[in-house]
Image (spheres, rainbow, N blue to C red):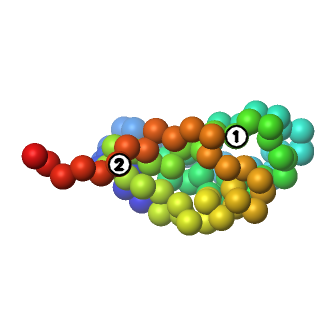
Amino acid sequence: MRNDNYQPKHADTFDLRAVTFDEIDDGSVDVLSIDVEGGEWFVLRHLRSCPTVLSVETHGKRYVNLFMAEITQWMAANGAGPVASDVMPQTSPA
């Protein structure tokens, strides 16, 4: 997946063991900020906790999360509505 046209270089890569969020979420998370470069839905769908404060980054300068519908649906189903948004309306060049 490309995000904001970033092109990874081999020198920028490394290997690590990946786990789903439910493997580290014991249900006690109160505050959660998710910004994982397009993978936010995969964190939300494995969330055990019901955080009091939840921040989900869903777009970049030239990118909108491909799972925006799922994220919006999850938030509505779990009583988490947008309180603030920095989404700017699209305007036509003058």
Q: Nearer the viewer, residue 92 or 11?
A: 92
Question: Residue 3's x, y, as percent?
Answer: 38, 51
Q: Amino acid at mark 1?
A: Leu
Question: Residue 14's x, y, as percent?
Answer: 50, 42
Query: Is residue 73 placed above or below 12 in the rendered structure?
Result: below
Q: In this rendering, would 90 be left or right of 42?
A: left
Q: Which mark is residue 89?
A: 2
**Who's the residue at 36% across and 38% down the image?**
11
Question: Residue 38's x, y, as percent?
Answer: 50, 53
> Does the image show residue 7?
yes
Q: Quadrant of the N terminus?
A: bottom left
Helix or strand or loop: what does disc 1 sit on? Answer: strand
**Who's the residue at 67% across and 49% down the image?**
81
First of labels 1, 2 by sequence position: 1
Q: In this rendering, would 67 be left or right of 21?
A: left
Question: Label 1, on which residue?
Answer: 54
Q: Residue furthest left?
A: 94
**Which marked residue is nearer to the observer: mark 1 or mark 2?**
2
Q: In this rendering, would 72 be left or right of 61?
A: right
Helix or strand or loop: what does disc 2 sit on? Answer: loop
- Near mark 2 (Cα within 10 A), the count class, few <14, some 14-19 or many ≥20, is few
Q: Nearer the viewer, residue 14 or 48?
A: 48
Q: Amino acid at mark 2?
A: Pro
**Who's the residue at 44% across and 48% down the image?**
59
- Near mark 1 (Cα within 10 A), the count class, few <14, some 14-19 or many ≥20, is some
The number of numbered badges drawn on the structure is 2
In the rendered structure, are the residues bearing label 1 and label 2 in contact, judged by CB atoms less than 8 Å apart?
no
> Does the image show residue 10?
no
**Who's the residue at 70% across and 59% down the image?**
76
Q: Nearer the viewer, residue 10 or 24?
A: 24
Mark 1 vs mark 2, CA separation in Å: 23 Å
